Image (cartoon, coloured by chain):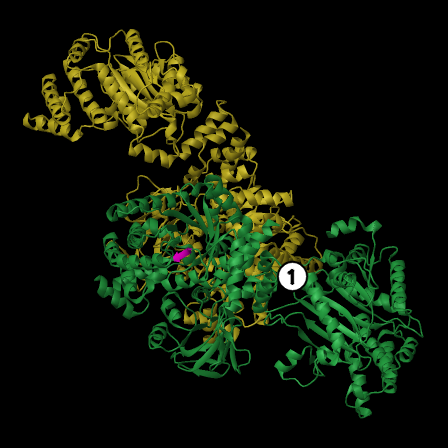
Chain colours: A green, B yellow
Amino acid sequence: MSATDLKASTSMSKWVYNFGGGNSDGDASMKNLLGGKGANLAEMASLGLPVPPGFTLTTEVCTAYYDNAKTYPEGLAAEVDAAVAKIGTTVGKGFGDQSNPLLVSVRSGARASMPGMMDTVLNLGLNDETVKGLAVLSGDERFAYDSYRRFIQMYSDVVLGVDHYSFEEILDDYKEVNDKFLDTDLTAADWKKIIAGYKEVIARDLGRPFPQDVTEQLWGAIDAVFGSWMNDRANTYRRLNNIHAAWGTAVSVQAMVFGNMGETSATGVAFTRDPSTGENAYYGEFLINAQGEDVVAGIRTPQPLTLKAKSEMGETADSLEEAMPGTFKELTDVFAKLEKHYRDMQDIEFTIQEGKLWMLQTRAGKRTAKAALKIAVDMCEDGLITQEEAVMRVEPGSLDQLLHPSLDPDAPRKMILKGLPASPGAASGEVVFNSDEAERLAQEGRKVMLVRVETSPEDIHGMHAAAGIVTARGGMTSHAAVVARGMGRPCVCGAGDLKIEKDANSFSVAGQTVQKGEIITIDGATGEVYLGEVKTTKPELSGDFGKLMAWADQSRRMGVRANAETPLDAKTAREFGAEGIGLCRTEHMFFEAERIVAVREMILAEDRGGREAALAKLLPMQRADFTDLFKVMAGLPVTVRLLDPPLHEFLPHSDAEIEEVAKASGINPEELKTRAHKLQEFNPMLGHRGCRLGVSYPEIYEMQARAIIEAACDVVKESGETIVPEIMIPLVATKKELAILKERIEEIAADVLRERGVELDYLIGTMIELPRAALMADKIAEDAAFFSFGTNDLTQTTFGLSRDDAGSFLPAYIRAGVLEQDPFVSLDQEGVGQLIEIAAERGRKTRADIKLGICGEHGGDPASIHFCEQVGLDYVSCSPYRVPIARLTAAQSALAAKK
Amino acid sequence: MSATDLKASTSMSKWVYNFGGGNSDGDASMKNLLGGKGANLAEMASLGLPVPPGFTLTTEVCTAYYDNAKTYPEGLAAEVDAAVAKIGTTVGKGFGDQSNPLLVSVRSGARASMPGMMDTVLNLGLNDETVKGLAVLSGDERFAYDSYRRFIQMYSDVVLGVDHYSFEEILDDYKEVNDKFLDTDLTAADWKKIIAGYKEVIARDLGRPFPQDVTEQLWGAIDAVFGSWMNDRANTYRRLNNIHAAWGTAVSVQAMVFGNMGETSATGVAFTRDPSTGENAYYGEFLINAQGEDVVAGIRTPQPLTLKAKSEMGETADSLEEAMPGTFKELTDVFAKLEKHYRDMQDIEFTIQEGKLWMLQTRAGKRTAKAALKIAVDMCEDGLITQEEAVMRVEPGSLDQLLHPSLDPDAPRKMILKGLPASPGAASGEVVFNSDEAERLAQEGRKVMLVRVETSPEDIHGMHAAAGIVTARGGMTSHAAVVARGMGRPCVCGAGDLKIEKDANSFSVAGQTVQKGEIITIDGATGEVYLGEVKTTKPELSGDFGKLMAWADQSRRMGVRANAETPLDAKTAREFGAEGIGLCRTEHMFFEAERIVAVREMILAEDRGGREAALAKLLPMQRADFTDLFKVMAGLPVTVRLLDPPLHEFLPHSDAEIEEVAKASGINPEELKTRAHKLQEFNPMLGHRGCRLGVSYPEIYEMQARAIIEAACDVVKESGETIVPEIMIPLVATKKELAILKERIEEIAADVLRERGVELDYLIGTMIELPRAALMADKIAEDAAFFSFGTNDLTQTTFGLSRDDAGSFLPAYIRAGVLEQDPFVSLDQEGVGQLIEIAAERGRKTRADIKLGICGEHGGDPASIHFCEQVGLDYVSCSPYRVPIARLTAAQSALAAKK
């Protein structure tokens, strides 16, 4: 029911829902009305579990409260009175009854968990008179006055807004003056004096005494909960977590039970399975003679629940299983009942009062990725949940933890630097500062850590050789980050405090110097850099992982491909379940040492003849690249993007490199420098690149098309496998560009097929990565067999925002709430997404069977993949290490769409 | 009628339309069916004018011919036979009749003039027998054989495809061997021998004799015309001029008349008014005893039509008025009749055969801008056309010629260099190579020509001081070009051959060196650069100009504003009729010598405090800027764009400049260099600029907002005039950016209004210059009182194309037909235009009265202005010198929309 529906039905509303005492007005499905806490308490009570009776003021009350200038709806007070009386009847006590007082807790509870909200108030109903009754009833005066002072403290802090330091000061002073050390050293008489001190502070601060009327206390607490719904903290939290203010919060009022009434009382928390490993074993801890807050406070060491846990942890204190075997049995029955009922692992709070078990809360338990995986698979295999439900239970992003090595949590470490968590995984290696050296040392079998100010395409070989990469500059989508993620190398980026010394033999950070050759360890999942080697643990891709992935694949509609160029990356991708290559960036192939000279020769050639001579040298190398790739991916589609970056990216910088090109080409160095200078651009991202190169220098794409088709022919001949190369033209803005290049490629292909005598299907398609291409998609589709959305460039142009330059203000933008997240990490669905929708719709209008995919960084981002499912794309393509994440997300999206 | 309609009606078509001999089947409205030539011949014949009889094969025949594998429709042959016979009856001759032969001309004629098409064939119907008849009939054997050889030559060239050099060779050889010099020296006997030679060549080349059958001749010519419709030249011309192949061409066949039958025969061309000045005086030339081609060939000097022209030109040869007074009278009656009928100045071809006047063609005459203006105004004042028609008669782009000085066409000149015609106008000045020197010399009263490799915002003062600008690099929309057009300075850009020597004391071009201080002259309308001073003529903004502009303003719906920053530019704009400022780029104000240091101090400051100190120095200067501007534009709206370019654009380059900033700010130079380096960007266009600066450094926009509102208050107080400043936020991509900045500006404004005690309306709006802004316009409009389309940036981002870098391939793209024109010059309506439409529609949906304008370079481009009218924008804003063009175009667009 939406907030509007709620409002519409206000006039005949039921404002208060009772639970406990044998029945409940609500149930677990009513989270929107009763909040998560209230709904689950009602549900547990309905299941016949021992829940202290109580009632919930609905979220509707909250909405009405704000809609009517902070006044409560008519009839609410009467309903609350009746509900309080009902609790009293159930537990045989009276609210405010001096001899037999009913005490209650008051808790907030919205439909989504909101840690920024008001905390709990316990022991409400105590005053100067009822405390005496409690003392008599419990036979423990100290307990009664301790409860009273706790209540005053909590209520004053949470409801009255009195600074809690005042109370702490009084308590500390009292202990010091009276030579007491622990709270437990204080007697009832001590607490009475302290309470008197508390009340003085309150009277002084507020100008009125601490409320003695229990109904006034209750309404004060209810007011405070509803008031907290609109405080700054809550507003901020809601904005960040997409929770609507109109949803409102509920308030649950519940009879108090006490775990601190002696040795037969206790309080504890438990998980029905191990939230860390997912093992099907009870997990939790408890304290004898304690209240819930004591378990959390950590003053006393909690005891384990089970004998098994006790022995595994080498504890000496009794487990609950030993201390209270009967109650333990009762508790485990509850566990079983709750898991079966909720069909998920539960996180539970319980209290044992004088031997009687009470359930205070249950909810789905938070868990690690590993546990989520194991629990989902186990529950499915036990028939508790379906395969589809199992697939929905694992957060795809969390798989990242499972696919990479991570730091051993117990290993000692010394952090020296923190940057951005650019590519997950942990690794150690000796510091090197340049890519050639990284490659050389790696070939000697040494593990190296490449440390750079920033990386460029010329560092590819060094990054490949390194165990990990650290850069001083660049954001989450800088060159280093993107390439590292693609290769599955851990990477820490934008570590601004890192200063590489001029001689490039050391780096310094906050006064500390690290020499070349020293070992450092990085954690790419946190962005942390440690001095020395820190032990890492290998990923465990257990059988559960494989099972869940197989189930996911059964539910999935979209294909999942990988972005990969090298046979190694392609193999990794295939192992991770990629169903093809969605993006092979041919420029990455150009940087290898043996061929970069020929590439430069081609770029700096004076005329077409010169370029063709250089390209002739490149053809066999490029053909070999594709041959290797097609072999690895045999039977699967491979999308090859023709040369994309502006030519100056390949140019030599140093005089030695220029000399090398001069020698190879026979052109004098000065002339080469002039030509190189001419190629420089103000805004390379918006310059002479992509298909613009293909139009200006047809011979480059002709060479690449020939290499692709020749390689495909050769592999078909040799292996007999089907190879369907998909040739992709980048940066198309007009139909004509594609038409011109397509015609040329078709001519080349026809020549090659004739020469090789092979029959072969191939596709020609285009990137949609410019707003204009998206807008003109109907025209462009006339010549394109497929569209692949290049969402990196599309985001750059739609926002007018360079990925490389955004670092200077994007963090501030996200802080200021201008952007909710980095649009290069998660697709800007409302802006860039519109263009994708337009292009998909128009492309299909022209060509109903056009293949649509995405190959930007967003192809591995869960939220973006959901969007792709909604728009109906055919596949997503991402870096190899994100393929499992994409498979799982695609499955979840498809399942969500089915609903 | 469209091509489709034509096809649909094919079965019952009439293929041939007769004209002449007292009546016509067609008329001038049937250009689509009969072509321009055929329709006008029919019209003239209907008017009772003396038109040699003939007929037109319709464009429908052409369409049918191509639709049916180059075969003619059934019944066509019979219709042609009948039409030929009808001509014969009318003129009393027979086609192929040996004693009384009918000769005809065959001409192509599409609905739009196509110079790339087939030429005319004259004298068709001559063969070895009919030539004898013609000799007898005309009593001039030489005339007959001369006509025959002309026919063979033309027909062979145009229809048979025989190389015309063969014929020229035969003729030249014959003359040389026989010692003849001029064609007129040749007798009938000579021509007979030459004809024999011609026929031999044809028989040898084609393997068959020259066709003697006159019907075969006629169909050959018809085939050739229809065939030429699809030749490469025609296809290219059509593509470039947006003419559809499906329109087809018509063929007109017409009885020959001869201006070369002696002293009572003549041929000529005439304009009903002077096409150069527009003066209402007959203008034209003729030759006695000549055919049309002789007038054009220029071997004999043609004679003027009128006595007046004769005396003005100081000619001695008789005018037609003197030589053939009767025919002259007849001709001027025709002129009057045609002008009155067509209501426009006509371009006419006529022939006088033995004293009888024949009209061969009439069409609207091409004319200069000056003439167009004068003719339109004169005709309107004479009641021939309405004011609205007068407005439609002048091509807005041509006004550029009238608004700037131009080179005296008769002045001698020596061209040394050619670049792009970047900003119209002609000017001379002494060469200087830097802006400071330009300013200094100009202050001494010297005229300087600023010569730079390229210009940057730091050259603004030098460009302002210079009479003109020449750059070696940059395209039509480079900084130099854009700024020069804005200032109305002539400019030649991208003169690639220009090399500025390292010492910057001279430049060289093709071996020639020009020293600093030498005078050069440039013509910004042609891109030509001359050595020395070339005489220029001043623009004549005569009364006609004012009248036409006033009429235009009456028809106009859209407002016209100017892009201007300085009081001088604003004054110019107002003089040219601007109705406000649509774009005041505040960054231009930052470069003046006294303030650039403060600007740099602000940019390089360590913290907000440092920035605020520097901004406090800038505030009074900025306020003074706006005060001046508001005074000039009093009563009109002024849109001020807050700072837009990335801060590094303002940074010092030289050590001396850095030293200066160091001194002013107290920060050491090394630190300054480091900070400057940090601000560098890979793609400044997509970087930290526009409102991103406003969000990161609120104090900058706060200073600017304060300066604007303070200035407005001061001017209101002083003058009592209404001032409505429109504060414009650049580069908005999200609603939130605008919301944040708007709130801050409103706070500042409220403060200032309170301080100054003034009531003032002001608007806050935004540029729409990013695709995302266009897509999110509905949301953005919630906070924007107006949108101004920044089509420069919008084009850059929509195409993913940097204006500064496009020069390297854009010309090739236009040549290859990928783009029809530079999208930075004329709006890409089909791509970028979609975003404008989307934004306009969505903006209005949110805010029905949102003010919509355009302030990119396109605001002064006629085709783009038409688009703005179609989308319903409220105003266009352009550089001051283009304001009249925009006014006229806007009027024409509004008139076109009314239809």
Q: Is residue B236 left or right of residue A27?
A: left
Is A583 within the magenta?
yes
Q: Residue furthest left?
A: B177
Q: How many marks?
A: 1
Q: Residue at x 38, y 71 (%)?
A: A465
Q: Position of residue B657 (x, y in %)?
A: 44, 69
**B688, above or below B163, in the image:** below
Give the residue at mark 1.
Answer: A241
**B370, above or below A88, in the image:** above
Q: Residue at x 41, y 49 (%)?
A: A766
A573 or B689, which is in the foreground? A573
Chain letter for the residue marked with disc 1 in the picture = A
Q: Position of residue B476 (x, y in %)?
A: 40, 48
**B264, above or below A59, in the image:** above
Badge 1 element: helix
Is B304 within the magenta?
no
The amino acid type of the residue labelled 1 equals Asn
Magenta part of the protein: which range? A580-584
Q: Position of residue A17 (x, y in %)?
A: 82, 59
**A108, above or below B881, in the image:** below
B74 or A716, which is in the foreground? A716
